[in-house]
Image: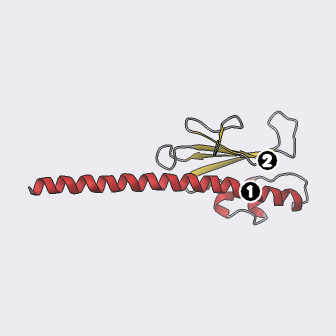
Amino acid sequence: MRTVAVILLSLMLFGCNAEKAKAKKQGNEASAVGSIRAIAACQAIFLETGGTNKYGTLKELGAKDLLDGELAGGKKHGYKFKMVVGDKDGSNKEFQYSVTAEPIEKGKSGDRYFFGDHTGVIRYDTEKVATAQSKAIGS
């Protein structure tokens, strides 16, 4: 009887740990989406007040105290963030930016990849780094 109790207790603890890990991943994903929203708001401020008439990099937004140091450094709550300002095709369209957020440890720190840009739409993908063609959140 005691062995059965130990087994049941172990299963209950395993279930609690699994739920805790799932909740942590969901919290990290919510934080990543919130960070992309914060970046969008900061970009609007930087564009108007930065004096350069362009969007800023993560470091530039941090240097103006628009982003916290952790996010300006490119990592926050289990996600790493990458910002591209202008167009990659060489046309240097100053009025464009994009940011991606990918889990530092896929499956552990998060399950989804996120993308945001100057349009304000946040997108996600479950298999690879999200892009402008990925599914929009809430659609």
Q: Is residue 55 left or right of residue 101?
A: right
Q: Establish if 26 lies above or below 64.
A: above
Q: Quadrant of the N terminus?
A: bottom left
- Residue 73 visible from this viewpoint: no
On residue 102, the disc is none
- Residue 33 visible from this viewpoint: yes
Amino acid of disc 2: His
Q: Is residue 5 left or right of residue 59?
A: left
Q: Nearer the viewer, residue 122 or 55?
A: 122
Distance of mark 2 from mark 1, alpha carbons?
Answer: 18 Å
SS state under label 1: helix
Binning the other alpha carbons within 10 Å of mark 2 as few (below 14), some (14 to 19) or many (20 upward) gives some
Q: Is residue 47 left or right of residue 62?
A: right
Residue placed furthest toward the left: 1
On residue 118, the disc is 2
Residue found at x 75% / y 49%: 120
Amino acid of disc 1: Lys
